[in-house]
Amino acid sequence: MSTSTIYTIVYFGGILAVALLEWAQPRRPFGESTGLRWFGNFGLQILGGVLVRALFPLFGVGWAAFCREHGLGLFNVVHWPAWIAFALTIPALDLAAYAQHYVLHRVPVLWRVHRAHHSDLDCDFSTGLRFHPFEAVYSTAILSGVILALGVPPAAVLLSQVLALTLDFVEHANLRIPPSLEQVMRLVVVTPDMHRIHHSQDPREGNSNFANVFSWWDRIFGTYVDHPAAGHEGIKFGLTELSDRKHLTLPWMLADPFLSPVRPAAADRPPTPEPVSGAVAR
């Protein structure tokens, strides 16, 4: 089975599976603008994919294979056992994803690009598609640089990207998971309840829970918040300065990086979340 076939199955299969789970077990009532949101979020994903493919003809597995063929990167120089290189690749790429996400919240010009993701007025699986094309280029460039520096095995890149893609849909899902199961899952991977906090309008909560696949990065680096102050049913999503319904439409999402902020950028907020009522920072 080709790499593109695997991506296609995971992408569309993930969307269908998570959408059905949301319908069967929603965490919160669905908003009134679901159709408008989905149209804009899917449109942004398509435009980002087109731009990335145009700028990065070799990406992911193909780029890793190119680096291996030309002996580029650490693992292609030191010749460690294949299983060690494979085992190290998964957490290394996920740590890079955590770091680049953190930087998006700390550097003003990058926050302007990233806030299109945070201006969604609700949070469901489609929010995992809502990334500005400029951010898609940024994150692809970072990932490509890490692959080049480490010379990671192509098969490990494939597994890492499949995990990231699947968890991206799941962690944004409006999905109710039994509390006992959710707490166990959260010890290893990011869950919807954990990531939902990151989309809160509360700056301290919005500056927490940056992890992509493995939840432990937030605990290690002190950016973990366990529970939202208002409870999951009471979270207000989005950004107060971009809260008009028009920001759910594709033209306004594309314009987000060029709009003047009404309040200080995320880079001016506290670098780590402070404990809030009902929350435990670890």
Image (tube, rainbow, N blue to C red):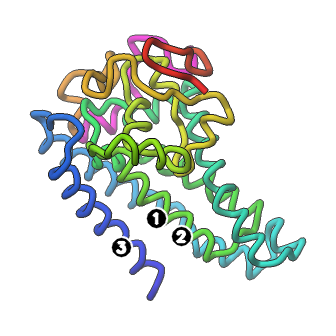
Q: The magenta stretch spans which residues?
A: 250-268
Placement of 64 over or under 257, stated as above or below: below
Q: Nearer the viewer, residue 105 or 141?
A: 105
Q: Amino acid at mark 3?
A: Thr
Placement of 144 over or under 257, stated as above or below: below
> Is 267 covered by the magenta stretch?
yes
> Considering the image in quadrants, where does the C terminus appear?
top right
Q: Sequence order check: which comes first, mark 2 or mark 3?
A: 3
Q: Nearer the viewer, mark 3 or mark 1?
A: 3
| Label 3 environment density (alpha carbons within 10 Å; few <14, some 14–19, many ≥20) | few
> Is 121 covered by the magenta stretch?
no
Q: Position of residue 125 (x, y in %)?
A: 29, 49
- Residue located beneath label 2 in the image: 57
Disc sitting over residue 8 in the figure: 3
Q: Sequence order check: which comes first, mark 3 or mark 1?
A: 3
In the rendered image, the residue lying farthest to the right is 78
Who's the residue at 46% across and 35% down the image?
113
Q: Nearer the viewer, mark 2 or mark 3?
A: 3
Q: Position of residue 106 (x, y in %)?
A: 59, 26
Q: Nearer the viewer, residue 110 or 14?
A: 14
Who's the residue at 44% across and 37% down the image?
194
Q: Position of residue 170 (x, y in %)?
A: 36, 52
- Residue located beneath label 1 in the image: 53
Placement of 267 over or under 73, stated as above or below: above
In the rendered image, the residue lying farthest to the left is 32
Q: Amino acid at mark 1?
A: Arg
Q: Secondary structure at mark 3?
A: helix
Give the Cα separation between the discs numbered 3 and 1.
Answer: 15 Å
What secondary structure predominates along the stretch shown in magenta? helix
**Circles 1 and 2 in contact, beta carbons < 8 Å:** yes
Q: Secondary structure at mark 1?
A: helix
